[in-house]
Image (spheres, rainbow, N blue to C red):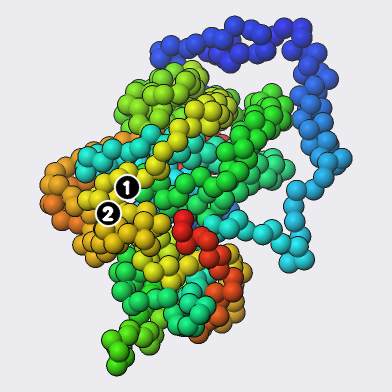
Amino acid sequence: MGLKKLIKTATFYEIIQGMSVTGGYFLKDKVTVEYPKEKIAPHPRFRGMHALITDPETGRLNCCACRLCETICPPQCITIESSEGPNNEKSIDVFDIDLARCIFCGFCEEICPCAAIVMTTVYELATYDKNDFFLDKEKLVANQVNARKELNRR
Amino acid sequence: MSGAPTNGHAHGAEEVHRPTLEELKERKLYTRQRVHEGQETITVSMGPQHPSMHGVYQAVVDLDGEIIVRTRPGIGNLHRGVEKLAEQMTYHQFIPVTDRLDYVASFAMNHGYCEAVEKLMGVEVPRRARYIRTIAHELTRLANHILWLGVHIMDFGAQTFFLICFRDREYILDLFEMVCGARLTHSYARIGGVSKDLPEGWVGRCRSVVDFLPKRFDEYERLITSNRIFNKRARNIGIFTSEDCNAWRITGPTLRSTGVARDLRKDEPYAAYDEVDFEVAVEYNSDVYDRFLVRMKEMRESCKIIRQCLDNLPDGPYLADDAAHVLPLKKNVLRDSAAMIQDFMHVIHGPHVPKGEVYRAIEVPKGEMGVYIVSDGGPKPQRLRLSTPSFYHGQAVPAMFEGEMLSDSVGIFGSIDVVLGDCDR
């Protein structure tokens, strides 16, 4: 054991060195955010709660009931039922997403050929009632105010 | 200290002594306590709910006093049947499931799976996509090692350091959120490239993070490297020589801490690793302290790799133009009918896959992750086998624990970096 190391051991050099790092944080700004009072805005690509987009002119859903999202969804959390109107128009009767099953992989948004289903930056999904995880068509359409439309173009 | 094998760790400017395998074996024999045959033992179950255990790993240990005589590992508490799930999903659909293997380093898992599928299908990945993958993989490695470091030091009793590490990991998770929309389960890699291009301003932000993190690593080193408590506790425990590592199929930083420069990024380059300049982090003493040093070196090397990739980031497509195997670009789907047909074909029928078997291994943060796929020509794999590092590391735990003190056991277990999602699959 060298003399230098002996002195370092005797004077608790490395403890003081470490404590200087920890003590330095007394003087620095906080990096934490007090969550319920202030929130960090998610980035635009954030994959949160889904939304269904309607055409602003006609008010109809963009969705053409092709069921691609239902097919590709890995946990199979999407249920779609559709019917055909008199003028061969498809109308969506049921569009349900079970958020309790959803893994937020973003495949539904990625493969949708009509840019109808998107994922929004809504992330506060914790709830006391399991029924709140069940999103029907009305809830999904209502959530489109949170959607960033330019994102559909990747 | 007479009769004790010399401690090979370097002190300051002293020359590094590289112990030979024989010396290490001798040191291992010396540091492990001798177990007396026929002694009465107490059986203690550590985990799956033990607060100091990592994840849901169960270790039922037989104790002679404080010395561990035998360990019976119990795994499978997080078993989800991922390999069976793969047989019911198309090759595209399985990508989000690979996130859930090693949830600390999920991009690495995406990447390994996609590399294997690309090898099976013969898809050539564009140069930009390979660079983006390299960057994302190294960011994952940083996030994984920083988290590991915090938890590992907490095993030895330092609480504050855990929070310091979590703060720095946040910068990396933020970058991931910006690029792919998720903080932990990225699902970013796709067959033939990545799912989204880098957003505006990402490159500058990433560069500032990798310039800034090495300063944090200096801070870590000032706190930990020469700290006497950590030194006393981590040195010369859990010695596992290169011979043992080969016998138990241990890879990654644990193997590199025994002086074996085995790194698939160098040995069998994938993505853009053959175009960047980096060193393989190697240490020689094979104990818990050296595994810490290897990971510290690796983090600095990762920053170096990312910086080089950002400097040389080429322009071009981020997804291969291959209608038979790759999902189309969303912007083409909305405008072009051929791309829309491609979209429908991929979702309903799945990609076009040749018959055959393929094995591809890559270096994920914890070690070597191999994917073995048997294809019968259908859109779903006939059999998919994942050989992930944590499983092999977890099974070596009885051999590592034998003769060690119970109080060191959690530190040793932490040093090999086992994530149970990766282990149980």
> Residue B291 or B49: which is nearer the viewer?
B291
- Residue A141 drawn above or below residue A22: below
What residue lies at 50% left-to-right and 71% top-to-bottom? A50
The amino acid type, in three-letter code, at marker 2 is Tyr
> Residue B188 or B363: which is nearer the viewer?
B188
Q: Quadrant of the N terminus of chain A?
A: top right
Q: How many marks?
A: 2
Task: Give the spatial CA distance, label 1 vs label 2.
Answer: 8 Å
- Residue A94 drawn above or below residue B100: below
> Residue B338 or B130: which is nearer the viewer?
B338
Q: In this figure, which residue is indicated by the disc labeled 2?
A: B91
Q: Is residue B291 visible?
A: no
What residue lies at 54% left-to-right and 9% top-to-bottom? B17
- Circle 1 SS class: loop
Packing grade of label 1 (10 A; few <14, some 14-19, many >=20) is many
Q: Nearer the viewer, mark 1 or mark 2?
A: 1
Measured as percent of width and height from the top left, residue A126 is found at 59, 72
Packing grade of label 2 (10 A; few <14, some 14-19, many >=20) is many
Q: Is residue A79 visible?
A: yes
Measured as percent of width and height from the top left, residue A100 is found at 47, 73
What residue lies at 35% left-to-right and 76% top-to-bottom? A64
Residue A35 sits in quarter: bottom right
The amino acid type, in three-letter code, at marker 1 is Ile
Which comes before the other along the chain, label 1 or label 2?
A: 2
Q: Which mark is residue B191?
A: 1
Residue A16 sits in quarter: top right
